[in-house]
């Protein structure tokens, strides 16, 4: 019981499309992870610098085109919450990346399997 060539070609094209789409999404997710990791590193460096300051030091945050005074505790809290949020985002992107890599791998394996079985 063999599958007709037209159906086989259509099946291979669909799987190939899935593989290409997964590869594109993998590249997008990898870029997003790298960007978020850079942001986390910047926040951690900023947090380290702020922690070294005395409690009576005046700290200003950029808001649009101006700077506004902010208590050091508020700045540290904001930096910590932004870092935690970015790490959470990175974690979810890593899960998505694993799913996409598995999808891509499975698509390639299915294509190879189809070619091997049609060659017999």
Image (cartoon, rainbow, N blue to C red):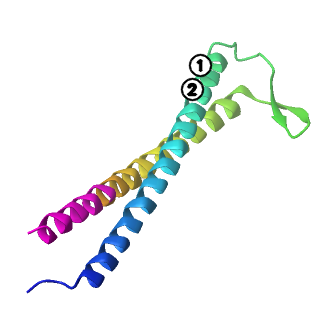
**Where is residue 72 shown, x and y percent of the image?**
71, 26
Instruction: From the viewer's side, name the closer residue of 79 and 65.
Output: 65
The answer for how far apart the CA atoms under marks 2 and 1 are is 6 Å
Q: In this view, does 32 lie above or below 113?
A: above
Picture quarter with the N terminus: bottom left
Q: Give the range drawn in magenta.
A: 104-120
Magenta-drawn stretch, dominant element (helix, strand or loop): helix
**As drawn, 47 above or below 95:** above
Position of 92 compared to 117: left or right? right
Which residue is located at x 65 percent, y 38 percent? Answer: 78
For residue 23, what is the image quadrant? bottom left
Q: Does residue 117 sit above or below 96 in this rendering?
A: below
**Which of these two is toward me, 80 or 2?**
2
* For residue 99, above or below residue 57: below
Q: Identify the residue position indicated by label 2 in the image.
A: 44
Please report the residue visible at 26 percent of the width from the left and 78 percent of the height from the top. Answer: 8
Q: Is-magenta flag for residue 117? A: yes
Secondary element under disc 2, as helix, strand or loop, is: helix
Residue with the most extreme right position: 66
Q: Which residue is denoted by mark 1 in the rendering?
A: 48
Rate crowding at label 1 as few (under 14), some (14 to 19) or many (20 or more) other CA atoms within 10 Å: few
Q: Where is residue 17 in the image (x, y as percent from the top left)?
A: 41, 67
Rendered image quadrant of residue 80? top right
Q: What element carries label 1?
A: helix
Nearest the eye: 17 or 37: 17
How many discs appear? 2
Is there a contact, CB below 8 Å, between mark 2 and mark 1? yes
């Amino acid at each position: 019981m063999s599958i007709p060539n037209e159906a086989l070609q259509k099946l291979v094209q669909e799987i190939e499309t899935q593989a290409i789409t997964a590869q594109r999404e993998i590249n997008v997710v990898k870029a997003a992870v790298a960007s978020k990791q850079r942001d986390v590193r910047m926040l951690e460096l900023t947090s380290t610098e702020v922690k070294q300051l005395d409690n009576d030091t005046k700290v200003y945050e950029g808001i649009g085109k101006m700077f506004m005074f902010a208590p050091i505790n508020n700045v540290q809290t904001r930096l910590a919450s932004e870092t935690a949020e970015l790490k959470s985002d990175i974690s979810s992107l890593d899960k998505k990346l694993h799913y996409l890599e598995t999808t891509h791998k499975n698509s390639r394996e299915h294509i190879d399997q189809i070619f091997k079985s049609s060659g017999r």
